[in-house]
Amino acid sequence: MLPNTQIEIDNFLVFSLLTLSFFLIGILRAYYWKHTKLLILASFRYRYASQYLRQDNAFTERVNWITFIVLLINFSLLFLYKNNSIYLLEFIIVVSSISFYYLLKFLVIKFLGKLLFIHDVTRLTVFFSYLSDKSLAIIIFPLILVLYFLAFDINLILINLVFIVGLIFLLFKSFWIWRVGTNSFGISSFYIFLYLCILELPPFVLITKGFFY
């Protein structure tokens, strides 16, 4: 096998970011494992999502913020992994872009909720949309670690694995948004389809295109 030359192993910024991500995941495991486990399971089962929502308190609020920081770090590293070396400015630009995307998504969901007079569904839509991405960011951390520091060139296998895991989470997220919107609130399937096509699918398609082409 050929040595992995995709990125400099001694890049201090990458090492620091991965260490910070690992530290935050360690905090979740040590102090908030009950809520973190519930958050991950909620991506696949609605009853866990309902249970997590009912436990809306200071602990879940901390979990939400910590997992969002993990999301920003891990998704940014995943996006930048093909660079020969990652610099602070590049990382800041990518983090800012990802933050802007989630802020834009939040504002669009809020606007649609007021426009369609479905205020109750707004919170659930934001919850399911962010929930799935946070869980994915935690799950793929070991894969990102291997991508950057494994001494052998198996990046294509790992990227395919990340793609499959991401696709699974996207399918579950779309399913729950569709099910809750249509069954619980009677929203037209057409509106839900537009939402998924505009806000959920394009980022996944663009990132996938960047990986494979």
Image (cartoon, helix red, strand yellow):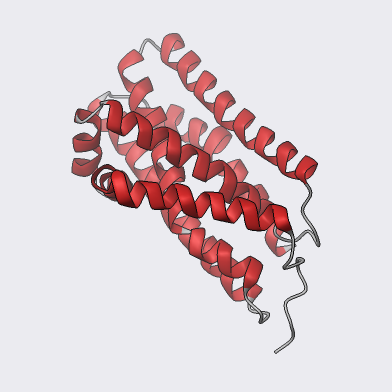
Q: Position of residue 34 (x, y in %)?
A: 23, 46
> Against 177, is 56 above or below?
above
Name the quadrant containing residue 99.
top right
Name the quadrant containing residue 7.
bottom right
Q: Position of residue 96 (x, y in %)?
A: 68, 33
- Residue 137 is at least partly visible in this image: no
- In terms of depth relative to the viewer, which is nearer, 64 or 166? 64
Q: Position of residue 39 (x, y in %)?
A: 31, 44
Q: How many marks?
A: 0
Q: Residue at x 48, y 38 (%)?
A: 68
- In terms of depth relative to the viewer, which is nearer, 60 or 39? 60
Residue 81 relative to residue 199: left or right = right
Q: Position of residue 90 (x, y in %)?
A: 78, 44
Q: Residue at x 74, y 86 (%)?
A: 2
Q: Residue at x 63, y 78 (%)?
A: 154
- In terms of depth relative to the viewer, which is nearer, 187 or 86? 86
> Against 73, is 182 above or below?
above
Q: Residue at x 49, y 64 (%)?
A: 142
- Residue 63 is at least partly visible in this image: yes
Residue 109 relative to residue 3: left or right = left
> Against 10, is 21 above or below?
above
Which residue reaches farthest bottom?
1
- In terms of depth relative to the viewer, which is nearer, 154 or 168? 154
Task: Specify the quadrant that holds the C terminus.
Answer: bottom right
Task: Specify the quadrant that holds the N terminus.
Answer: bottom right
Name the quadrant containing residue 210.
bottom right
